[in-house]
Image (tube, helix red, strand yellow):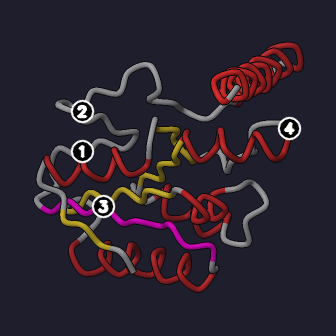
Amino acid sequence: MRVMRIARRAVAVLATILSTILALAVSGGMARANPSMLGTFDFDHPAFLHANPAATRHVVIQVSAAAPGHWLMALNNAQNLLAALGAKKVQIVVVAFGPGLKMLLADSPLARRVAALDAQGVEFDVCHNTMAAMARHLGHMPKLVPQAVVVPAGAERIVQLEAHGFAYLKP
């Protein structure tokens, strides 16, 4: 009985994801889809939307709280690191998952600030696992700010970056 419930839930999630993809394709929205590492994620070889080979410092910032105050603190930390170390000398990746993913929703009150930091080279990664969980409740995949890069799992991305020398910061 439990296996049947799990199977029905999996089919429902797949149907939601497929209908979202189909709706995007039909509406022409595929061209506006967020960059994704879903098919290319390789734990041993991190990829970046904003590669910074000249960087001598590398930082990953975790955002997993629903509170906008935490989001603001994470963005302030990123801005302060850019100012202190120089944009060309630091590579910063902000990883949002769980309730923190709301910071990178299209209607986020901090969307402009995210865009400004992205323009300075800060990468914003979002957890696909969290997106799929949200889709089960919303009936569709959540709409993200255009700067968001979809990764398979937020926690996995953080562990990957730490394994490759990134300093970990959780404001």
Q: What is the x, y in percent for residue 116?
A: 55, 64
- Name the amino acid, label 3: Val
Q: Secondary structure at mark 1?
A: helix
Front: mark 4 or 2: 4
- Name the amino acid, label 4: Gly
Q: Is residue 30 above or below residue 83?
A: above
Which residue is denoted by mark 2 in the rendering? 43
For residue 139, the mark is 4
Other residues around mark 1 within 10 Å, as few (<14) / some (14–19) / many (≥20): some
Gap between marks 1 and 4 measured at Cα:
31 Å
Front: mark 1 or 3: 1
Front: mark 2 or 3: 2
Task: Identify the residue shown where x is 47% and y is 49%.
Answer: 125
Which residue is denoted by mark 1 in the rendering? 160
The quadrant in which the C terminus is found is bottom left
Q: What is the x, y in percent for residue 72?
A: 55, 81
The reply to whether callout 2 and callout 1 are in contact (CB within 8 Å) is: yes
